[in-house]
Each structure stands twice: as C-alpha cells, then as structure tokens.
C-alpha cells in the first residue's frame, strides 16, 4: 500500500515560556512512498527520522499536514487501527514470556470481527516464525537468545498481524557488525517475500544504500533528496548529501570557476564551460581520480595502501577542506609508491560543484 505524506510537520513546543527554543523536528515533509517498496529514511542523529516514523505510526500527532495510507486519510486514526507493524532499536520483548507467547501476544488482543481461534493464531505465529527463521526457538525466553535472534522475534511480532506497513526504527543498531550485515539482508528478504511497504530508519548510509529501493535523505527536519540509492550517490543535490553518502567519503576542495575553467589553487583541473565565474566547493568521489604524470592536480602523498584489486592513496593538498584526501585507484594503474607527490586528472562525472553560498549543486 502506498503512503502519502503531505506537508507533514512536527513542532515540539518550547518547555520554557520565556525562551523560544521550540524544535521543528519535521518541516513540511512531502513524499509518496510507492506500494511494496523498501524505503530507507536516512540522516544524522536528531534530523527527525524517528519523529517522522512515529507520526506515520500514529504514536505522535503531527502539528500540521496529512498522512494517507492508500486513499485513506489516517492522520487522526489511532495506532491500533492503522495496520502497522513496528520494530525499534531495543527489541522490547516481554522478558517473562517465551518467544511463542511474545509473537502470539498481538493476536490475542484482537477484538470483535478480527478475533482469531487459538489454532489459527498458532498457525500464524509459526508461519511468521518460519519466515524469520526462529521456529526452533519458540519455547525459549528472550534472555536465552542472542541479540540477532531477539530482533528476529521482534520482527516476527511486528509481522504477525499482517500489517499493511512495516516501520523499522534503527533495528540493527544493537547488533555487532557481522550480525548487522546478516540481519539487514534478512530484512530485505522478508520484505521482498511479503511485499509489505516498509520504512527503514537508519543513520548508517551504507545500511540504507544496500537494502533500499529508494532512500530519503534528511537534515534538520528537512528532506534533502529522494531517489534510488545509486542515483543519489551519482548525482547529489547538495553538499550535505554528497558528504553523507559514500565510504570512503567524498573529498571536498575549495575551488573557483574562472573563464570556463575549474581551478583548485592555481591549477586548472577541468573545463566547466557552462558555469559562471564564482567560488565553489569541489566534491570529488574517491574513485574520481586518475593517476597521470601530466595531471593538473598535484597532491602530497602521505600513504599508499595496496588492497589487492584497488590501491588507496592518502594525500594532502592545501585547498582540501578535509584533513586528508582519499582516492581509490585501480591496482593496474602505474603508481610510484615511493613518490612524494602524485598528479591526478579527474573523471568529470565524479566531480560535483556546489555553490559556496548555498551549498546547492551547480550543474555543468
Ligand atoms: P532522529 O530519529 O533522526 O535521531 P528525532 O526524530 O528523534 O531524530 O528528533 C528530531 C528532533 O526533535 C531532535 O532535535 C530532538 O531533540 C527533538 N525531539 C524529539 N522528540 C522530542 C520530544 N518529545 N520533545 C522535544 N523535542 C523532541
Ligand atoms: Mg531516532
């Protein structure tokens, strides 16, 4: 089922009447989430991800705007009546209940026409347990499970009522690195198998990039960009998005455009014919550098790390806005490991210009 957010806004009022420290946690959010897709809601801590999710779930009431599930306006609907499944960072299982009882719990609370027989409930519980691969753990207590297993139980519990929408708030944050990787692939598999429209909140760009059909990047309550992960990476709308996506991160230089040429320091590094003269931030992806003995961009080499297929060159430049520049070059390219400087030419499609004033992208 598609979800439509229309001018969605949440303002937390100031606690103290005298000071004006209200927080605009979510600012005029407009977005249509297509049916059956997994959406990664991504941004740094405090940017309004959880608040957005809680408004979609009904746990928090918007200050303004509307939420539609399909054609239905659910803005005023209570959480129980929205048909959602929720999973949080801390698994929040009932510690005194077994896995089976935890999963059955949401079904036992169904009322009226939704009420199920005991057999039907058990059948459903085992069905979702199988889906998340915990059917052999049904009689254990949460304390007898690993973090990854507990999170699967939490996902099973969220799925057991067959929700129309699955909402996941940083569900992998409490898992160790290997389990995080494994569980995110599991979530992707479960989402594909069930076809449930899913919103996955995370501050981890790699996590969001790897499993989402679409990512939504937020900053300070304001949506910055929406798109397929690769499209956003390949064409960031502003400096914030460019910096937020990618490992290693994008390299940023102070630059200027003059007479159709892009300068970093005194070096004319690229032609940018259509751009007016101005100071710019120059973003260059790590894979955007080509080692070239006649290249215009000269950097001071600090370290060369050979990693089999790739070579990672760590260098510095006085116009770099980051302390170090990290470039990833193909191991087949000739690189003099002992040299003090390295010269680069740039791949134009890996270079992005941003306005010095607004930090918005300047297209060329
Ligand atoms: P995220 O999940 O992206 O880390 P949140 O949605 O939790 O961010 O918070 C967004 C902003 O709203 C933050 O500045 C946070 O401090 C503020 N905030 C969240 N909940 C409350 C609340 N109940 N009262 C006041 N401010 C809040
Ligand atoms: Mg949060």
Image: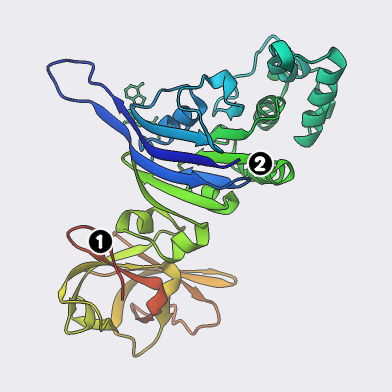
- The residue lying at 54 percent from left, 71 percent from top is 310
The span from disc 2 to disc 1 (Cα, nearest Å) is 37 Å
User: Which is more N-terminal, label 1 or label 2?
Assistant: 2
In-image side of 164 versus 145 (left or right): left
Mark 1 = which residue?
321
User: Where's the C terminus, which quadrant?
Assistant: bottom left
Ligand 2 under 8 Å from disc 2 Cβ = no
Residue 324 image position (x, y, % from top left): 33, 62
* Secondary structure at numbered mark 1: loop
Question: Crowding near pointer 2: few (<14 within 10 Å), some, many (20+)?
Answer: many
Any mark on residue 31, and which?
none
Mark 2 = which residue?
187
Q: How is the image coloured?
A: rainbow
Of 295 and 95, which appears nearest the observer? 95
Q: Is residue 78 visible?
A: yes
- The residue lying at 29 percent from left, 79 percent from top is 298
Q: Quadrant of residue 349?
A: bottom left
In-image side of 122 versus 341 (left or right): right
Question: Crowding near pointer 1: few (<14 within 10 Å), some, many (20+)?
Answer: some
Residue 211 image position (x, y, % from top left): 60, 50
Residue 71 image position (x, y, % from top left): 54, 37
- The residue lying at 72 percent from left, 17 percent from top is 114
Residue 137 image position (x, y, % from top left): 80, 24
In-image side of 194 versus 91 (left or right): right
């Amino acid at each position: 089922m598609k979800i439509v957010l229309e001018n969605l806004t949440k303002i937390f009022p100031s606690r103290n009447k005298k000071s004006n420290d209200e927080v605009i946690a979510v600012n005029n959010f407009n977005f249509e989430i297509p049916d059956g897709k997994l959406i990664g809601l991504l941004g740094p801590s405090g940017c309004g991800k959880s608040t957005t999710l809680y408004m979609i779930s009904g746990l928090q009431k918007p200050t303004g705007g509307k939420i539609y599930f399909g054609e239905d306006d659910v803005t005023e609907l209570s959480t129980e009546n929205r048909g959602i499944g929720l999973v949080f960072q801390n698994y929040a299982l009932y510690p005194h209940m077994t896995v089976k009882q935890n999963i059955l719990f949401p079904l036992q609370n169904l009322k009226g026409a939704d009420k199920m027989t005991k057999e039907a409930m058990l059948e459903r519980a085992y069905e979702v347990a199988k889906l998340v691969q915990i059917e052999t753990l049904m009689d254990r207590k949460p304390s007898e499970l690993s973090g990854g297993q507990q999170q699967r139980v939490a996902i099973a519990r969220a799925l057991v009522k067959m929700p129309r929408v699955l909402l996941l708030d940083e569900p992998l944050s409490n898992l160790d690195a290997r389990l995080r990787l494994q569980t995110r692939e599991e979530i992707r598999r479960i989402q594909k198998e069930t076809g449930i429209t899913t919103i996955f909140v995370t501050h981890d760009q790699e996590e969001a990039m790897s499993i989402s059909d679409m990512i939504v990047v937020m900053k300070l309550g304001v949506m910055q960009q929406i798109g397929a992960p690769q499209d956003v990476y390949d064409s960031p709308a502003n400096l914030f998005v460019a910096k937020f996506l990618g490992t290693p991160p994008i390299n940023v230089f102070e630059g200027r455009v003059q007479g159709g040429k892009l300068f970093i320091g005194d070096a004319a590094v690229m032609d940018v014919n259509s751009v007016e003269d101005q100071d710019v931030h120059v973003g260059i992806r790590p894979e955007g550098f080509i080692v070239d003995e006649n290249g215009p961009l000269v950097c001071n080499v600090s370290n060369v790390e050979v990693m089999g297929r790739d070579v990672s060159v760590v260098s510095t430049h006085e116009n770099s806005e980051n302390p170090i520049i990290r470039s990833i070059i193909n191991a087949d390219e000739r690189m003099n490991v002992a040299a003090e400087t390295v010269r680069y030419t740039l791949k134009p499609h890996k270079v992005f210009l941003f306005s010095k004033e607004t930090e918005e992208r300047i297209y060329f």
